[in-house]
Image (cartoon, rainbow, N blue to C red):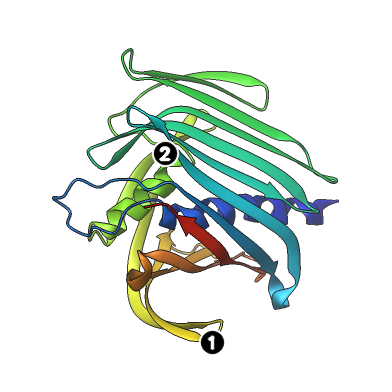
Amino acid sequence: MQRYKTPSKIISLLAGLAFSSLAVSASTDSTAKSELSPYEASYTASMSKGVSLNGQGVRTLTDQGNNVWLYRTDVDSFIADINESLIFKWKDGHVIPLRYRYSLSGFLIKDRKQSIDFNWQEGIAKGKYSGKSFEVKLEEGTLDPLGYQLQLHQDLKAGKRDITYRVLDKGDYDTDRFAVIAEESLSDRGQTMKTLKAEKVRDKGSKRQTLMWFDPEQNYLLARLLQVEPDGSEYELRLKDARVQD
């Protein structure tokens, strides 16, 4: 039974990070006003030795009007089904979360749900995780577990190469840091691209590793994401298809 838990968590993580790279227009001028572009993207996932996780995922970004957007992920696999969504405001190149929802269910795994509602006027976020309610004071720039992924992409496009976020998750704050560590050529589907290789910076001695390859020539599209677990297991996502509206 235990062996099903790790892949479900990995699908959730990789699904989120993979498509954060598609949602913003092509401007790399950090002083320019960035605009979001609606899109739909799909991906495939595999684990160690290339074994398929039989997962199909779709992420969409849709304009709701008045600078309000819906960011959504739906993953369907034999291990787990995941539905994650965020309603947010887009202001001056920054994500301002309003309503976050997450639901995971699957075969031989424990269902998980989380909800967070952000009240910026009162400076308070209220939510529920695993049936327990929480209330947290909002910090300036607070992001949610989905919104920080969109903000990461925007900041990379703006030229930033070492970025830290405060993320509200499960009733508490996490500090997540990402850094570009190299320029690296990557071959995929018979094509070679020059990419920016980034990693999630973890505590010294951590045996878990998350690596991401972004393609500047294709609107900073994430070409590959690799997660290495402490036991040496590897989980990988590769983009399958993306359609971005002008």
Residue 78 as seen in the image, left or right of residue 40 = right
In the rendered image, residue 158, in percent from the top left (x then y), is placed at 23, 56
Front residue (pair 112, 43): 43
Residue drawn at x 32%, y 49% as measured from the top left: 164
Find disc 2 in the rendering and name its residue.
Answer: 167
Number of marks in the image? 2
Q: Secondary structure under badge 1?
A: loop
Neighbourhood count class around disc 1 (C-alpha, 10 Å): few under 14, some 14–19, many 20 upward: few
Find disc 1 in the rendering and name its residue.
Answer: 190
Amino acid type, callout 2: Val
Residue drawn at x 39%, y 36% as measured from the top left: 143
Front residue (pair 206, 155): 155
Neighbourhood count class around disc 2 (C-alpha, 10 Å): few under 14, some 14–19, many 20 upward: many
Image vertical order of residue 213 relative to residue 152, above or below: below
Residue drawn at x 43%, y 48% as measured from the top left: 149
Residue drawn at x 74%, y 50% as measured from the top left: 5
In the rendered image, residue 58, in percent from the top left (x then y), is placed at 60, 51
Q: Secondary structure under badge 2?
A: strand
Residue 175 seen: no
Amino acid type, callout 1: Gly
Residue 153 figure quarter: bottom left
Front residue (pair 207, 117): 117
Q: In the rendered structure, which disc, 1 or 2, sits on the residue that comes first in sequence?
A: 2
Residue 82 as seen in the image, left or right of residue 138 = right
User: Mark 2 and mark 1 in contact (Cβ < 8 Å)?
Assistant: no
In the rendered image, residue 117, in percent from the top left (x then y), is placed at 48, 21
Residue 88 seen: yes
**Residue at the front extreme of this rendering:** 246
In the rendered image, residue 178, in percent from the top left (x then y), is placed at 37, 58
Which numbered disc, 1 or 2, marks the residue closer to the eye?
A: 1
